[in-house]
Amino acid sequence: MRYYSTNRQVPEVSYEDAIFNGLPDDNGLYMPDHIPKLSAEFFENIGDMKLHDIAYEVASQFIGEEIPEADLRRIVEETLSFELPVVEVEDKVYSLELYHGPTCAFKDVGARFLARCLSYFSAKSDKKSTILVATSGDTGAAVGSGFFGVENIDVIILYPKGKISKIQEQQLTTFGQNIQALEVRGTFDDCQKMVKDAFLNKELKEKYNLTSANSINMARLIPQSFYYFWTYALLKDQGDLVVSVPSGNFGNLTAGLLAQKMGLPVKQFVASTNVNDIVPSYLTTGEFTPRPSTSTISNAMDVGNPSNFYRMKEVFGSSWEAMKEGVKGYAYDDKQTAETVKQVYQATDYLLDPHGAVGYLGLKEYMKDHKGSVGVFLETAHPAKFGDVVEPIIQQPVEMPERLAEFAKRTKVATEIDATQEELIKILEKA
Ligand SMILES: *Cc1c(COP(=O)(O)O)cnc(C)c1O
């Protein structure tokens, strides 16, 4: 498989180059040169297949010969070393719980796969690289955990000061060793821009062998498609599948669209956002208008310039009409989100986190007029990660999984910097 840039100003590259480059030099995004179709036989048997076998089949379509079968099977198994339960919340409404990994958010899936792919190629060539990653909360922890102790790879995490939850901050500032945290005086968009600008600076990129672990990296996207197949395998006999994806940078949704293009029978995708509704507005108006992000209680989705939008465009052949058919978009404010957490908890005993609640709302809105389908929303983080938001809503303590409680006990180590390129360069020089 070859990967092209959505801006089409640079040559196609291998999977290895695509994941080490992260971002193509023309500031586009890598996309596979064709989207492989899985066989009819695969879909006939999928109900009897194990998660790891499904995931391997999907991964091998994108990676081809570049990673031999035995290594790719190992990478897939190590990536998904935890469960992905699909839990019934109400009749025909299911939660795909993606938070059973080490940092309690779905980003573990992409980060663990990326870390293992990079480390596979690094071991072969013995090259050293530095991962730069901007985080709105959960990515930093997942990437830190995925790369912790990995040889030849240093990680620098940029996060917006005061704009992530306490436990998220504890997670990403307490790894030590090859993982460094930068507390940036600015927003997530500032952090993302600093990382992007560093990659666009050719000299800097080469000098420090910079690589990106953000959701723009293809190796983050590919494994996120696994769980759409898995969900289908579990629910396929229950009706037309509708999937609602609580979205920020739209990596998760894009991975779902790729799965659908590979032949996965998803009837409808729903893009659910908080008030940072750039994509839902695009679907309504045809105008893509990025703007500074607004802080919300679903902070991992506070994104004002969703980077995977250009990949979504590619999937739909740049047609707005096609995209608005393929994806329905809905946006919700904090009040609606909080009320939903409360109501669903009272009615069903199921505790949503604020991101999952946004996904639930979008799913229900679509399903109102589409009876007979079976709906799934992605539960992207454990509610205890957002205890400071969730506890006052349900007026009860939220039990913290042991692995989260561990992070809370450690000591924060972060370097505070201004949101400028000069400051970031100073850090790189010291590293
Ligand atoms: C990152 C994140 C999202 C948004 O995912 P995208 O792929 O960026 O759209 C949603 N929920 C949680 C908990 C997240 O960490």
Image (cartoon, grey):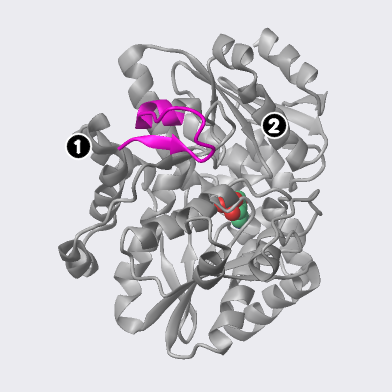
Which residue matches tag 2?
Answer: 158
Q: Is residue 145 above or below residue 362?
A: above
Q: Quadrant of the C terminus?
A: top right
Q: Residue at x 72, y 27 (%)?
A: 182
Tell me where residue 188 sits by quadrant.
Answer: top right
Q: Is residue 263 above or below residue 430?
A: below
82 in the magenta segment:
no
Q: Which residues are magenta?
A: 1-19
Rounded to the nearest whole Å, what is the CA distance between mark 1 and mark 2? Answer: 35 Å
2 in the magenta segment:
yes
Mark 1 packing: few (<14 Cα in 10 Å), some, or many (20+)? Answer: few
Amino acid at circle 1:
Glu
Instruction: Indicate the position of residue 297 as horizontal and vertical percent values.
Output: 76, 59
Q: Residue at x 67, y 14 (%)?
A: 428
Farthest residue to the left: give it.
41
Q: Quadrant of the N terminus?
A: top left
Tag shown at residue 350: none
Left or right: 269 as drawn, with respect to 132? left
Tell me where residue 26 sits by quadrant.
Answer: top right
Secondary structure of the residue carrying tag 1 is helix
Secondary structure of the residue carrying tag 2 is strand
Amino acid at circle 2:
Leu
Mark 2 packing: few (<14 Cα in 10 Å), some, or many (20+)? Answer: many
Q: Is residue 350 above or below residue 68?
A: below
Tag shown at residue 69: 1
**Closer to the N terminus: mark 1 or mark 2?**
1
Q: Residue at x 77, y 69 (%)?
A: 333
